[in-house]
Amino acid sequence: MDGHNDMAKDRIPRVDTYGFERPDGFDYDFYEDFYSRYMTILTRRALKWSKMMQKSTAVEKSLKVKRYIRKGIPNEHRSYVWMIVSGAQDQMERNLGYYHSVLLEGQKNTKLVDSVVTDLNRTFPDNVKFRKNASPCLQQTLHNVLVAYGQHDKGVGYCQGMNFITGILILVTKDEEKAFWLLDALIGRILPDYYSPAMMGLKTDQEVLGELVNMKIPAVAELINRHGVMWTLLVSRWFICLFIDVLPIETVLRIWDCLFYEGSKVLFRVALTLIKQYQAYIMEANNFPDVCEKFKDITKGKFVTECHLFMQKIFTEPGSLSRNTIFKLREQHRARLLAQE
């Protein structure tokens, strides 16, 4: 096995396209096998996309666009498509020069700058592009976008987790201003109140997930209740970081393709699919630490690496998940959490 893995190791770079170093124990063999299959899919998708992108109405909302996005946006179009479908492009064009003016304002706000600086070195220690000695070093870009955003949305300011999200936006767009407007689309419109100081939207969505698991995978919900585990211990990182540093980067980008187009409901689909896929494994847990350990394990391995199959599963496995259901559950749980405060 190891001999094979060593050969694959020689063929697959230790640092991926996005600058992330592959972790110890990375299964080079499996990845090589997966990627050779995935390349065929990517090539086919790229041809279909380049055909669609020739039309002026290329990414207007339609069933075809939704289907294309669910099957993955090719890297070369990702930044453009995210900007259009999220409304970020529109905001950027309406507010020319705005980004630079809030950045200048924000740089005078020492409290904000300090809180951003504290987290810079903690952002993607395993990514070579964010290291101080990198050229260009993306830490400065990250610093600028976070400071500008904190000044732009004073109700949020800077909150942990935003550094990881912004880091990915910078890696995809390679553009400070676009990353800023995409962050604005996510925090201001797509995610309901995840990053305000009280994190009410985040707490609500963790409870909503618990309720959805209760409805769709009751045995797991019962096990978690029995061991007295809080959902927040199991899934807060999934939601705060939108699966960054939880799932493999290719898979995260595919999830985000859908997140920008379809909204935050996609996050529940991903979480439910992981739990459902590994139901039998989770059910082996005998105590509190076991449950926590198993929830860490289910985000690694072949199932989540095979991003194309994984994305097909998230739209079939959890069954129907209407906007209305999510809306009602959010309202109920939000009211309950507010009453407890």
Image (tube, rainbow, N blue to C red):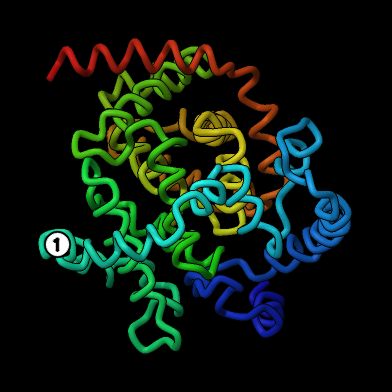
**Tag 1: residue type?**
Asn
Image coordinates for residue 43, horizontal then vertical, percent = 84, 62
Image coordinates for residue 250, horizontal then vertical, percent = 61, 58
Query: Mark 1 falls on what kind of element?
Result: loop
The quarter of the picture where residue 221 lies is top left
Within 10 Å of disc 1 (Cα), the crowding (few <14, some 14-19, many 20+) is few
Where is mark 1, residue-wise? 109
In the figure, 270 relative to 226: above or below? below
The quarter of the picture where residue 316 lies is top right
Q: Quadrant of the N terminus?
A: bottom right
Q: How many labels, in total?
A: 1
Image coordinates for residue 281, horizontal then vertical, percent = 51, 35
Q: Quadrant of the C terminus?
A: top left
Tell me the residue at 68%/52% (across/down).
306
In the figure, 104 relative to 130: above or below? above
Q: Is residue 211 left or right of residue 215?
A: left
Tell me the residue at 32%/52% (across/down).
161
In the figure, 165 relative to 18: above or below? above
Looking at the image, which is closer to me, 120 or 170?
Answer: 170
Looking at the image, which is closer to me, 196 or 236?
Answer: 196
Looking at the image, which is closer to me, 105 or 126?
Answer: 105
Tell me the residue at 29%/39% (across/down).
289
Image coordinates for residue 42, horizontal then vertical, percent = 79, 59
Tell me the residue at 76%/39% (across/down).
65
